[in-house]
Amino acid sequence: MVGVSYLIIFIYLKSFVSSTEDCPRKICNCLGDIVDCEKNNFLNVPDNIPKWTRELNLNNNNIVSLRGDNWKNLTNLTELKLNKNNVVNITKDSLDNLKRLKFLEINRNHLVHIEALSFKSLEQLSVLKLKRNRIRQLTDGVFFGLKRIQSLILDYNYVQVIAKGWLYDLGKLKELSINNNRIHQIEMDAWEFCRDLGTLDLSSNKLKAIKRDTFKYLSMLKKLNLNSNNISYIEENAFSHVPNLKTLLLSSNKLSGVIEGGNGVFRSLASLQVFTLALNNIKSINTYAFEGLASLRQFDLSNNNITSVQKRAFNEMTSLEALQINTTMLLCDCHLRWFFDWLKSKRLEVHTICAYPKWLRNKSLLSIPPNNLTCDDQLKPRLTQEPDLEIMALKGGNISISCVAMSSSPSPMTFQWKKDNIDLTDAVVINRRIGQDGKNTEMESQLNISKVQQTDAGKYQCVVSNTFGTTYSQKSSITVLIYPKFEKIPQNVTVPAGDTAKLECAATGEPPPEIAWQKDGGTDFPAATERRMHVMFSDDVFFIVRAKPSDMGMYSCIAHNIAGTIVANATLVIQEKPYFVKEMLSKEVTEGESVVLQCMAGGSPKPSIVWLKDKNSIKTTERHFFTAEDQLMIIVDTHLSDSGTYICQLNNSLGQVMGYSQVTVKRAGITDSDMMGIIIITVVCCAVCTSIIWVVIIYQTRRKIPPPGTEMSQPEEIPSEYTERMNNFGDDASEHSSCKDSGTGDSAKRSNDDLLPGDEYTLIINGINPNDKNSTMRRVSLVYLVPEGNNSHTPLLHSDNLYPRSTNHDRLPSTSTTVDVEPNAVSIEPKG
């Protein structure tokens, strides 16, 4: 092991001896691979620097310029110091060939301008220091190529703006220090390329406010130094982008309003451990001033003449270990009792001396018995009237807001108005005493704003203070209303059907007006129903695609806000080629009749209509009429010459179209329809005549039949008993007539015999063997007709048919009378 150590030492000494052999001893000192050429009044970089040099010190010389060929033999250089020279500019090739350089210092020179891409070849550089130069502006891409840089020091220059452009390509940067410059602005998204930044020093600059996005993208930031600026305003949630912040230094600013107003601007700093607010002229600490600082361990409020601490102001600081307060202006009354108890419980050593009341003056708060902290007087100002929460003013008008405060202290009250937490210095304010008794004084402060402009919008606050403290009113939000005004007015549009129609409309105002569209005074948009309407709010454009004639009309752009409403109208015209709404039909008429030809037209512009016959124009005559805007042509009293081809020609600016109708005029005569009518009339007449003939026949028949009861002449051969039996027939015989309806009521198919009154009998002729059902019988009905004025009964032979014996005669009721006629005799007897 010892041998190995000796070997290492030997190798080192050998290399040291060999390296120092080439060292320019007359001008530089060498130690190993370190070459020190400090204080030699060089005007340029020496040419005889050894190639093996790794660290080169050229401080305190008079070098004015840097050239790329100065380093062509120094490719092994890792550290270069050029402090306290007279370098004015760095160009694109000034640092070429230094590809292994890791550390570069060019402090205390006269650098004014650094060109873009000046450090492009320094791929290994990790630390760059440019302190105490005269740099006023850093061009975009000035640090491009520094892929591995971790620390950039630009202290004591004249940089005014932190911009995204010159921070480009600094993705590995961990530390950035730009203190003691003239920075007054941090541009939007400036830190987009420095997301890994852990330490940021912006102290001793001219920053006045911390806005919501001032530290956007710096979520990895651990330490932020903002000491010695002019910061008087911190926007709510301004620190929401730095949730991992551990140290925040805000001493020597103007943050009294932020702390006294209690806006809770630090509530997102849950990881904060060290916080300084020394020298901020803080007089009072609001209850919500330090809300959210649960991890805070060290808190510096020194060199602030604090007079009051509101209840629970430090309650969330559960991890607090050290609190620095050195005030001699405490108002030791009952309102400070909680602070007394809190300090005792935390066992914190603080320098808190009472100034009021007089009998407790110059005594330490912690040495006063708690029972002596009483509220006998209201020395600190107390607001009795505060501004309204919401105030709306029309642009160009005048408004006034006021507050009233009361105090029992002889110390005069002073009023200060703030807008967005920033003091108003040139405001028109009228302060006056409105009341005073033996103990209290009441004052009013009125803020007047004339000819209100948009820049007057914001949150206003009344602040009243005296020797014993400061009181803040609630914030009054003033909204400036601006009547809507059109920036883009929709114009009349004419497009062919099927194309896209575009209407533009934009308006300004405060609050920004809402834009709405109407069609023909309503909200019925055919294009919207058919999903052909598109509204591009970002471009203030209203589109109708695949335009149709139904989209035509007057479109109204309505801009509305609280201040009022304005309307602009534009007409949309859809042009369409002429077309036929209904196809034209051919007509056939008889000579002398009228004919109507239809030509239902559509299109936009509305087409003109021209009627032609056989290609000749038709004019209005005694027989030719046009109506419905020439869409109907009527020809009365048609002639054979009216036959032919009629043409309806439609014309508009987009084209022409023609329709055809063939008209045929026939000679007057019997037509098929007339013949059909004649046939129908003939058939009807025949039917009527036939019915009349039947009625006459029936009538005549009834007149010839004698009434029932009339005696019938009998042949001499008929026995006398036949006559007697005939005279004894009853009227009920008619009920068994074969012509009688078998049902109740009249039959629907009654024969003509039913019209004949009287009795009906059955006459069996030649009935040789009545018991033989197979023998032939003749059935005869006898009906008695009773003529008017004649009481005689004359039988009438009604029918004469042949029936077999097995027919209905077997089923005749017992009351029927049967007449059996033999060859030499005829007999009548009841059937039964």
Image (spheres, rainbow, N blue to C red):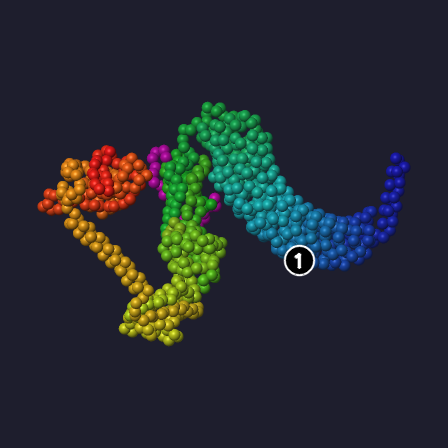
Please say if 543 is above or below 710: below
Q: Nearer the viewer, residue 40 or 590?
A: 590
Magenta stretch: includes residue 425 = yes
Q: Residues within 10 Å of mark 1 (few under 14, many from 20)?
A: some
| Residue drawn at x 31%, y 73% as measured from the top left | 639
Quarter occupied by the N terminus: top right
Q: Nearer the viewer, residue 660 or 669?
A: 669
Instruction: List x then y, in percent, for residue 41.
Output: 75, 56
Instruction: List x then y, in percent, for residue 618.
Output: 34, 74
Where, by quadrant of the figure, is residue 557 drawn? bottom left
Q: Nearer the viewer, residue 418 or 119?
A: 119
Quarter occupied by the C terminus: top left
- The magenta segment is 421-440
Tag 1 residue: 115
Instruction: List x then y, in percent, for residue 373.
Output: 46, 27
Secondary element type, mark 1: loop
Query: Taking 318 as reference, is 44 left or right?
Result: right
Residue type at mark 1? Glu
Q: Is residue 502 visible?
A: no
